[in-house]
Image (tube, rainbow, N blue to C red):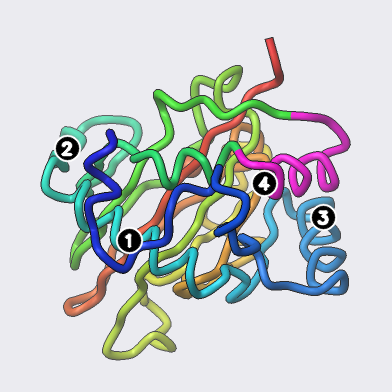
């Protein structure tokens, strides 16, 4: 995976302490608001919280990884309908998701430590018509809580009522699907955190001209 660092201009690995910027640029108030949202709705966000250098590094790695992305699409009759392109994470994203800031953030919100499930964490690339139907993250043991990092989010009209640049969050019961309790806007540089294995959630179909690039990190309780 060392090819992920071949980009010139991208920051070095996060394990290099001397060159490591903070991952998040956000205040205690924002963290408290996010925690309150997670407690109430199962999901919360830290708007535009990613350090600019880290966002640039992740975007560079996503571009590299996109070369190996595969198209993922459900059948018409599948219970979970989805369409997107997905790619494995490189060293940069992995070190960020496993690093001390994310570990501390999860522990602060959920009151316990979590371990990244690397094999089911990924980059996801959405274009117009792509979507991810209502679901709970699974397998639940491997994906008890989720961190989503948005790298790109473009739209000709992000305020349109049917924009795909939103994460709809429902309740814990399947009957709650379709009546969003929370709508989190998809904004580059924002971070979303949630109990995705318990609370149903959904990305609606992206409109023409819309794109989203995101990292999904799945976490489990330590072995
Ligand atoms: Fe999910």
Q: Residues within 10 Å of mark 1 (few under 14, many from 20)?
A: many
Residue at figure coordinates x 39%, y 85% from the top left:
158
The residue singled out by tag 2 in the image is 76
Disc 3 and disc 4: Cα gap in Å? 21 Å
Region in magenta: 99-113
Identify the image quadrant of residue 112: top right
Ligand 1 within 8 angstroms of badge 3 C-beta: no
Residue 22 position, x and y percent, is 65, 62
- What is the secondary structure assignment of the residue under circle 4? helix
Residue 16 position, x and y percent, is 55, 47
The residue singled out by tag 4 in the image is 102
Please tell me which of labels 4 and 1 falls first in the chain.
Answer: 4
Contact, CB < 8 Å: mark 3 with mark 4? no
Residue 167 position, x and y percent, is 50, 61
Residue 177 in sight from this viewpoint? no
The residue singled out by tag 3 in the image is 40
The residue singled out by tag 1 in the image is 213
Residue at figure coordinates x 69%, y 59% from the top left:
44
Task: Please identify, in this view, whether the residue under mark 4 or under mark 1 is nearer the observer.
Answer: 4
């Amino acid at each position: 995976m060392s090819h992920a660092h071949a980009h010139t201009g991208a920051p070095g690995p996060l394990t290099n302490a001397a060159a490591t910027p903070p991952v998040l640029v956000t205040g205690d108030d924002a963290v408290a608001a996010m925690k309150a949202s997670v407690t109430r709705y199962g999901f919360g966000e830290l708007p535009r919280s990613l350090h600019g250098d880290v966002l640039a590094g992740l975007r560079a790695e996503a571009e590299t990884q996109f070369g190996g992305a595969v198209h993922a699409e459900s059948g018409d009759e599948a219970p979970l309908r989805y369409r997107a392109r997905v790619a494995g994470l490189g060293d940069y994203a992995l070190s960020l998701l496993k690093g001390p800031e994310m570990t501390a953030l999860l522990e602060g919100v959920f009151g316990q430590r979590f371990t990244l499930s690397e094999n089911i964490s990924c980059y996801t690339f959405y274009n117009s018509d792509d979507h991810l139907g209502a679901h709970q993250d699974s397998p639940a043991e491997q994906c008890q809580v989720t961190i989503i990092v948005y790298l790109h989010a473009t739209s000709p009209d992000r305020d349109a009522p049917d924009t795909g640049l939103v994460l709809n969050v429902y309740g814990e019961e399947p009957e709650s699907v379709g009546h969003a309790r929370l709508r989190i806007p998809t904004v580059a540089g924002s971070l979303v955190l949630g109990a995705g294995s318990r609370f149903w959630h959904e990305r609606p179909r992206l409109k023409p001209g819309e794109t989203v690039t995101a990292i999904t990190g799945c976490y489990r309780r330590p072995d």
